[in-house]
Image (tube, rainbow, N blue to C red):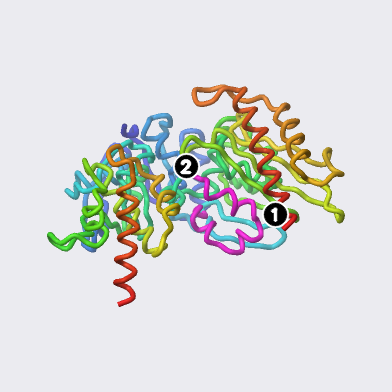
Amino acid sequence: MKPVAFDYVRASSIEEVLDLLLEAGDDAVLLAGGMSLGPMLNLRAATPSLVIDLNRTAGLGGITANGAVTTGAMLRQTQAMRDDLLMTVVPLLAKAMPSIGHYQTRSRGTLGGSIAHADPSAELPLCLLTLGGEVELQSKDGSRRVAADDFFEGVLTTARQPTEMITAIHWPRRSGSFGFVEEAQRHGDFALTAAAVWIELDATGSLAGGRLGLGGVEDRPVAFDLKEFAGAPVDENLATQVARDIAGRTDPMDDHVADAAYRRQLAGVLGKRALMEAAGEAGS
Amino acid sequence: MTRLSGNSKHSVRMTVNGRAHEGYAEPRMLLADFLRHELGLYGTHVGCEHGVCGACTVLIDGVPSRSCTQYAVQADGASIETVESLADGDTLNALQAAFRNNHALQCGFCTAGILMSATAFLEETPAPTELQVREMLSGHICRCTGYDGIVRAILEAAGVQAEGKAA
């Protein structure tokens, strides 16, 4: 299908985008890579009166590393994957990003676009939540940072207000080790369920903390603190018990591709595998 | 900051296969439709129109991209390469010849997109493994071949290109 008619502005500055948002509000959409919004426009699931194109907007790219690592909202997924610093400092992204879409969509898709879109099965929202990162939002009133825990509110729904835009994503540097496993019907498809793990071990090699995140299970990515399971080494028994316990606390979605019971089962199995991957990495 | 009205056509200029072109598009016109209907370059195919099937894949400023989830007005000033850039007259390039040698197409609908993806992919990954080729191909749907011929063709083309580069 073809989209309904929309006005189009190629914004050259953040200031321009914010002026347009203030004027148009809910009637405007922000076009990043277009890997989700493009299909929604073409299928007429989105019928905005104005499309604001961010692809040539200054100040939305790049990667800077101070305490946290900050990625510009318009950083392309392929650019991120080719950045040695980002992949080294945020190893969970290095593990998860090859599962995002395809070679031909990562080239265009952006980090900020995926996080703004907030598909419940998407990898980047899951990683940001698991690591406890933040989203930077800007409006004419100034900027604010929202923790990932508060940002994702439901299916394609976030804490972003109509007059705000995402300008950057903050990825905390976490010590420890990481795992990422997802199950999809075909390589590059939406994940039925994905598990992301960050674990911290104490001096004796026992689990001390971290988080286990699950995507594609509930209407938004969810993450669980691993502190309550601390005190023992992460072996197969512990991984099985932790993942099963956490899977039991989820309230999975039921849809045409997978029912709730299957998603809960996947959460347990993939959570365990992701924990074992992280533990294996810590042991090596 | 120019606001392009949704109800009128606007001039769009781009370089396609090394040649400057100009056409007219409403903001909602897909880049793929612009290439076909404004510029007459029918080699780029339009399949699903939501970024899944890969038939419309072209190179935009050297980057393999879907041309159905981008709008023509976005590509104003860009440099595009389509399947028409590959052959030299009637002489197929190495990748196209490998597709022919390996029965890597039947109906040909998906072929243009796959050729453009593979062109960029082999530039970046000159000696790919079969797994890498198959992962790249996950972004394309072929309903005729079962993919084996396509995988063989791309691996063969990588061999041909590697020899060409060594010489």
- Seen from the viewer's position, the closer of residues A111 and A274 is A274
State which quadrant residue A272 falls in. Answer: top right
Chain letter of the residue beneath label 1 in the structure image? A
- Seen from the viewer's position, the closer of residues B166 and A173 is B166
Mark 1 residue element = helix
- Seen from the viewer's position, the closer of residues A44 and A56 is A44
With A126 as the anchor, is B138 left or right in this view? Answer: left
Residue at point 69%, 62% (across, down): A66
Chain letter of the residue beneath label 2 in the structure image? A
Quarter of the figure with the N terminus of chain A: top left
Q: Earlier in the sequence, mark 2 or mark 1?
A: 2
- Determine which residue is flagged by label 2: A187
The kind of residue tagged 1 is Glu
- Where does residue B167 sit, x and y in percent of width and height? 30, 77
Mark 1: give few (<14), some (14-19) or many (20+) Cα within 10 Å: few
Magenta segment boundaries in residue numbering: A75-101
Is residue A76 highlighted in magenta? Answer: yes
- Determine which residue is flagged by label 1: A281
Residue at point 33%, 76% (across, down): B166
- In the rendered image, the residue lying farthest to the bottom is B167
The kind of residue tagged 2 is His
- Where does residue B27 sit, x and y in percent of width and height? 32, 42
With A10 as the anchor, is A177 left or right in this view? Answer: right
Mark 2 residue element = loop
Residue at point 64%, 40% (across, down): A195
Is residue B51 highlighted in magenta? Answer: no
